[in-house]
Amino acid sequence: MTVHFPFDNTYARLPDRFYARLAPTSVSAPKLIRLNRDLALQLRLDPERLSSSEGVELLCGNRVPDGAEPIAMAYAGHQFGNFVPQLGDGRAILLGEVVDQDGIRRDIQLKGSGPTPFSRRGDGRAALGPVLREYLISEAMAALGVPTTRALAAVLTGETVVRETLLPGAVLTRVASSHIRVGTFQFFAARQDVEGLRLLADYVIGRYYPEAAESDRPYRTLLDKVIAAQADLIARWLHIGFVHGVMNTDNMSIAGETIDYGPCAFMDTYDPATVFSSIDQHGRYAYGNQPRIGLWNLTRLAETLLPLLSEDQEKAVADANAALEAFSGRFEAAYHTGLRRKLGLLSEREEDLTLAGDLLKAMAENQADFTLTFRRLSDAAAGPEGDEVVRNLFINPLAYDAWATRWRERLSLEPQDGASRRAAMQAVNPAFIPRNHRVEAVIQAAVERGDFAPFEEFLTVLSRPYEDQPAFAHYSEPPEPNQRVYRTFCGT
């Protein structure tokens, strides 16, 4: 029984300076933790064969599947505002590309597959905890409807990795529309390799934004498309309380997907200054700063494209600035549309933004849980009898009462009946998110006791985030004070 990957690799056909060719490093005793069977089928792969001993050998890097052309991709990046001219895949190897059931080209990458020329003295390995975190949160994001990389499989290596302590090692098989980043463009720009920039830009246009090829100005259109995709993505993050945690330019996907789940987390109580990452000492990547940082990163992308926008430097800069000016309007439109939907407002009125802003202000002042406030508003939208469960989330329930009076007046101008409004709001306000204390509990069970049952159960809950699941209602509850997780870690 042979595992077949229908590879059709295009990035590996680019010149050698785009990557390093090498095979994954083998491991001693691989054991499958979990295979994402639905995703495997979507990728036109056989789940039964992937679950076999041969399949596990491929998923851990002990064997290279037929048709694969394993490479570690080169890129640079700004890390917390400081430019590093060479980063690259230091612990990941791209096996190749497949075309899925919908005709969409997907990368298949092994993360934690051993050292590469870009490892910078690192071991190239991944610990079990970060692998489970990325599996959980990336799959939760997919179920929430947010563009994201996906997790195809997690495999124990049978070996230990050295971090602050000895930890079990693992490999994640990650699937993405692209692993090309803003930092990939920066890699060539830093070397003044205009030919490389043009090859990369043409590749991105051909693979992800073919409509740009029909434009009179394809590179300007490319920039416009990436700006729009990132504006929409970051708005979606804010709608669900997601904090990426490390929005370096090497962690921003050109395809507009969420990528690189390191110290990421979801807010419990609403606070725009929320920071979880242990390495973000000054709040650069705080929840409320993410739109500003997104624009900052996109400005770095625009700088790399200047030689392609015009031979006249002044015209190129003016063109780039004109493209970047569209970010704020695109983000605000996406963010405000999403806020209206979260409040049950399908039409637009001038006072809506003030109404939404006042709710968020009251939530922050009263330490209200972000996810539960909006979810329980869905019930309150069906009638005042639902108010009590919302107001109990506020330190001062009167703050909610004052706001709710105005909200109901606004709802009265909408045509929907209560039941329809409730259903529409539940479709955008999740009941279940990967709350940090739950993620940590799952990781602890797996790492310390080898117990993966909590991981499996949590994945089941997170696969249906917008549905009421009475048997799992406790997963929707915020942490008790002694359960709160204030710091998350990168895992490297």
Image (tube, rainbow, N blue to C red):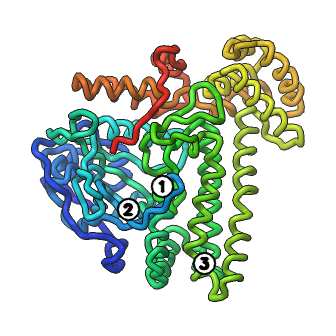
Q: In the image, residue 315 lies at what x, y percent? A: 71, 82
Q: Cβ–Cβ below 8 Å for labels 2 and 1? A: yes
Q: Nearer the viewer, residue 477 or 124?
A: 124
Secondary structure found at label 1: strand
- Please state which amino acid type lies under the numbered disc 1: Gln
Q: Residue at x 80, y 13 (%)?
A: 398
Residue at the left extreme of this rendering: 28
> 430 or 252: nearer the eye?
252
- Looking at the picture, does residue 34 appear above or below residue 90? above
Whether residue 435 is visible to the viewer of this picture, yes or no, is no
Answer left or right for 5 relative to 307. left
Q: Residue 186: horizontal and vertical position, in percent?
A: 48, 69
Question: What residue is rendered at 70% in x and 69% in y?
Answer: 323
- The amino acid on which the numbered mark 3 sits, given as a three-letter code, is Leu
Q: Residue at x 46, y 31 (%)?
A: 487
Q: In this figure, which residue is indicated by the disc labeled 3?
A: 306
| Marking on residue 79 | 1
Residue that carries the numbered disc 2 in the rendered image: 87
Dot placed on the residue nearer the N-terminal end, 1 or 3: 1
Marks 2 and 1, the one that precedes in the sequence:
1
**Which comes before the other along the chain, label 2 or label 3?**
2
* Residue 139, x across and y down, in percent: 43, 40
| Figure label count | 3
